[in-house]
Each structure stands twice: as structure tokens, then as C-alpha cells.
Amino acid sequence: SQQGEEDPQALSIQEGENATMNCSYKTSINNLQWYRQNSGRGLVHLILIRSNEREKHSGRLRVTLDTSKKSSSLLITASRAADTASYFCATAHNTDKLIFGTGTRLQVFP
Amino acid sequence: DTAVSQTPKYLVTQMGNDKSIKCEQNLGHDTMYWYKQDSKKFLKIMFSYNNKELIINETVPNRFSPKSPDKAHLNLHINSLELGDSAVYFCASSQTLAGVGEQYFGPGTRLTVT
């Protein structure tokens, strides 16, 4: 299966701490995207990183991509209770579709 | 102002029934999708349409039939519902083809088959 694996499956931290989640995939990609899903809601796009990029920032989010290791990480700095959600990576291997990872459930305690 | 909307939000029905879920996007996007998210939160593509043309059909049983009357709408009809069809179904859209840019998701339709 091409499905990405995310690690950890679940993560609990205190407000103000940083949260790091990782995504690994199996075949070469065009780009990798991160999405957030709040409980009972649809997914929201956070950031897209192309295969020729190594790092990207958006506000408190930092994404890295290592194509040699076929892995990416999402860092959320200075987390807030409102960051509590599931986070999914999605890989684009061609122009047809995105393959979503298994997700990381993040719980941020106030 | 909802970008991608779906109706209904909840659908409870019995095995063997036929049901439809509707999706509309007001973003002017060319491509629309249906995804299925199971109880373990795995999200899997079912169908995608680009300018009303079917692009992807991911080995979904033919009880599932998508219909795109125009670029802004992609409906999903399900015949002879089975227990295993219980899941959350998400509609999504993107400006161009899936692998190029970001996708915008609807709020989901939680389907429960009893």
C-alpha cells in the first residue's frame, strides 16, 4: 500500500510546548501536504511542500521534507489548546490523487 | 459563504436501502472528490471528477455511483446499502488535479447503516 505512516499515533502535551509529528512514505512524490481535522469536522489544508523543497514555514508551523529518507515532519511551536486535532500527511505521487497517512491525534492540555 | 457543502450531515438508514449524498462547491474549482473515512480515521479516495469527467474510480463497488451534473456539484448515490458502508464520507475540491495543489473539504456526512 502507498499509504503513509504517521508517528506517533497519539501525542499529549501541555500548552506552550512544541509538538512534532512525523510522516513516512514509500514511493517518490511530487509534493507532500499536511492537513488538520478537528473532531467531527472536515480536513483543513495547512501547508504544502514540494519535492524540491526541504523546509517550509507558516506561522507556528514548520514542515521539513527529506526525500532521501522518504519522510516529513510537522512541528507546531508554542502549542495551544485549540491545536487539539488529528493531523494527516498526504502525498501526491502523480497528478491524480492524494494518499493520506494514518494520522496523529494531538491533545494539548491547558 | 461555505466553500464546500454537503447534505445531509447525518444519514441513518437500514441495510438494503438506497441513499444519496449531495456536494456543492462555490470555489470555482475544476476537480471534485469523494473520500471515505472509516472508524479508524483512515481516509481513502473513492472518486474524482475533473470538469465533470470521471478521473479516478478506486475499485469502489458499483453500488456507489457518482454523478457530476456540472463542475460545482458532485453527488454520490449508494444502492443496496450494507453495514460496511457505515463511515464518514467527505466531499472535496481543488483548483486543478489532485497531485498539484491543496484540497478543500466539506464537513462530512456520517452514514450509519443498521
Image (cartoon, rainbow, N blue to C red):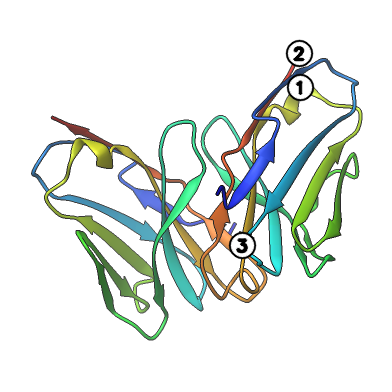
Rendered residue at 55%/49% (across/down): B1
Please give the chain letter of the residue carrying mark 1: B
Residue with the most extreme bottom position: A52
Residue behind mark 3: B27
Whether labels 2 and 3 belong to a single chain: the reply is yes
- Counting from the top left corner in percent of width and height, residue B76 is at 81, 43
Q: Is residue A59 above or below residue A101?
A: below
Q: Which of the two residues, B114 or B77, is positioned nearer the viewer here?
A: B77
Single out the mark in the foreground, 2 or 3: 3
Please give the chain letter of the residue carrying mark 2: B
Residue with the most extreme left position: A16
Dot 2, how many residues are within 10 Å of its Cα: few (below 14), some (14-19), or many (20+)?
A: few
Labels 1 and 3: the sequence-earlier one: 3
- Counting from the top left corner in percent of width and height, residue A108 is at 20, 35
Residue behind mark 1: B83
Labels 2 and 3: the sequence-earlier one: 3
Q: Which of the two residues, A9 or B13, is positioned nearer the viewer here?
A: B13
Q: Quadrant of the C terminus of chain B?
A: top right
Rendered residue at 38%/51% (across/down): A6
Residue behind mark 2: B114
Residue B61 appears in view = yes
- Counting from the top left corner in percent of width and height, residue B41 is at 51, 37
Q: Quadrant of residue A17?
A: top left
Q: Secondary structure at mark 1?
A: helix
Q: Secondary structure at mark 3?
A: loop
Please give the chain letter of the residue carrying mark 3: B
Residue A2 appears in view = no
Single out the mark in the foreground, 1 or 3: 3
Mark 3 is on which residue type? Leu
